[in-house]
Image: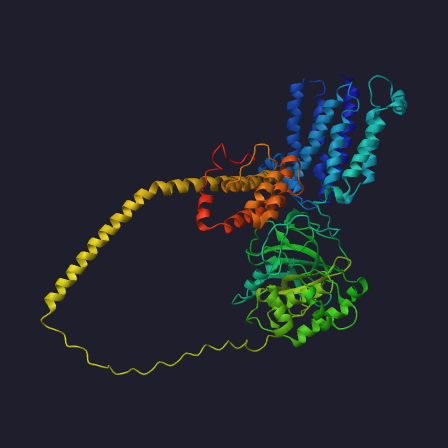
Amino acid sequence: MTDTGIARARILVLMAIGAIIGVAAGGIFDEYQWPLLVAPLAPGVVMIVLVERGAMVRSVATALAVLVSVGVALWGTDGSVDDLVDAFTAGPQRLLSTEWPSPVRADLVGTIAALTATATALAAELARRKRWHLAPLIPLVVVAVIVVGLSAPLGVRWGLVMAMGAAAIVFASLRDDEGLRHRLRLLRGERRLAPLLAVAVATTAIVSLPIAMQVRADPRRNDAAQQTAPLLDPIEATNALRSLEPSIVLHEVDASWSGTAPRLWRTAALENYDGVRWTPDLTLRPIGRTLGPAQDPVIDYDISFLDDDISLVPFPGSPVSVDAGVETDPERTVVRLVGRPDVGDVIAASATAVPTPDDAAVVGLAVRPVQDEVSGLSELARELGGEGTILEQLRRIESTMRDDWQLDSDVQGGGLQQALIERFLRDTNRGNSEQFASGFALLAGSLGVDARVATGFLIEPTTAATFGLESADATVWPEVRLDDGRWLPFGPVPLQEVSGGEPPPPEPQVQSPAAPQPPIAPPPEPATDAGDTETDEQQTTESALSTALTWALRGVVVVGLAALPVLLAVATILGVKFRRRRRRLRAANAAARIRGAWATATDALVDAGLSIGPSSTDTEIAGAGEAMVTGARRPLRRLASLSTSATFGVPAQPELLADDATTCLVTVEAAMAEERSWSQRARWRLSLRSLRPSTRSPVAD
């Protein structure tokens, strides 16, 4: 056990290191957080006071001190008791699922406070033991690496690292076996100190590289999203807003302008076109106030939400900051409030003004290889754009579409399918605003330019400090990326709609009905003396039909009862096979789904008559089964290869491979069904070979 005075001094130095880590932890949120600075103090003070008490007392006291540190952090960020629980449970997962910088939320700040306080408490406990001289630094070094990693886009802040290094040197000099002067000289021979500091600095530098925390995007960089997930269809939402009658005010913007207010207010941007529609596949994560770099001129404004169904934040350019809890993607194509807004909520936001054509001429356009989907439009784009630079060509295309083509919101064939867009571009030159925006974006892409479609609001020119964004202002427009990452908007949509829509197609001619003709002969006179005879004949006929129907129903019941066991057997066989197939293809593990798809395919081959030996490999099974699947030999071999890879290795991108395996299985089953007659298919579907232990496939699920 160390001397009490030396032990307390060592704990005091560890508290200082913990405080330095707390300062560095502000980088996670891109702003200083004072609760993180004081988080290590409570457990450190408790350990200094109770350094001579028993282990049980110290453990209970330090645990309470950690809770106090987290409580102070929650109090400093307006947290609640629920946030205290979340700080120790869901907080770490929530922290890693946010964009950098993380939002300043009580549960997230509490998680970091709990981490630093716990590390300080553990380090202080180790500092009491003489034999573990430098071991107390290990928990703090680990936490420092985690903190720098979570704030990785900032890189290594060498001032804080050097301060930690100096404190570590002081800590290493505090030993209880010699005088202070001797301990300072002893540092030259401390063989464990230099490797420890070298490893700490190297590990911190490596982990802090931005590429190591790529999933936490840096607003100063324009990295592409690594994951995608469906969000919404902004174009359909725009159409729905525009069709509201009467128009309603959705937002009110309040700011002071040096001139005319920005006319375009973007809410979403779509870069993926699949030939049917523009798809907003995004991964949204919570983020702090900072959204992107501030480049002059910056527009500061307050925006109010006047409809609680609207959660997308409009920006008049590239987002810079927003004073609200929001979630976004790395490209900042969508910024959405985390919670549903209340009517009247006002948030402060700022954005960089959109670039001008003059900026584009200086910076240049971002080019990319022409994709096959739009390569057929390159000749038309060059014809419309004429000679000159790509920017000049795009300007000519814009003016031609806006001045010479016709805008008709009710045009026939106004969809976004590629065939309709090409018909609009090549033939009719008459379409709705979505077709104008999509057509321009596709023409720009055919010239090798990175283009997209944006949705939002287009307002009338105004110099007023306060104005509204109405549902009638909702619109769509195309944008082109510049080399510096900004997006230049274009306006190919005509300002006025044409008067009247296209004439409807002519209705098919219908032949006029002929005039009624007189009867050829007069109707026969009713016989007054045959009534009784007709009544008797009718009763006889009804009696015969009733008897026949009764016997027919009895026959159906008898046949049904006789066939019931067969139907139950058929339903049981098909049900067992269906449940087995579904269980295999819905396994939680992707590798298990791949093997399950192969097992289902081999069961189908066995039911078709294939015999598989217990030691047969997947390749051998596929080779033997090709004769039964002549129309899908390649998918069968591919499925066997995927199964082998999933069984004996760890395949890359297993989820995609599992989907590929399912597709191959469906192809194999469809080919086997197509190559058989209906009777052969029935025998194949109802075969028990794959269910019997003696004949079933040896392939494991």
Relative height, residue 89 to residue 419 (above, below): above
Q: Nearer the viewer, residue 306 or 659?
A: 659
Residue 333 image offset from top left, x and y in percent: 67, 55
Q: Which of 257 and 500 is in front in this view?
A: 500
Q: Which residue is drawn at 75% across and 20% down?
A: 128
Q: Which quadrant is home to the N terminus?
A: top right
Q: Which quadrant is home to the C terminus?
A: top right
Query: Is 401 displayed left or right of 517 in the figure?
Result: right
Relative height, residue 320 to residue 586 (above, below): below
* Res 136 visible: yes
Residue 153 image offset from top left, x and y in percent: 76, 45
Q: Which of 28 and 686 is in front in this view?
A: 686
Looking at the image, how many numbered discs can be counted on the residues? 0
* Res 254 visible: no
Q: Residue at x 58, y 73 (%)?
A: 408
Q: Residue furthest left?
A: 529
Relative height, residue 334 to residue 603 (above, below): below
Q: Residue 661's image quarter?
A: top right
Residue 264 image offset from top left, x and y in percent: 67, 64
Query: Is 22 displayed left or right of 250 in the figure?
Result: right
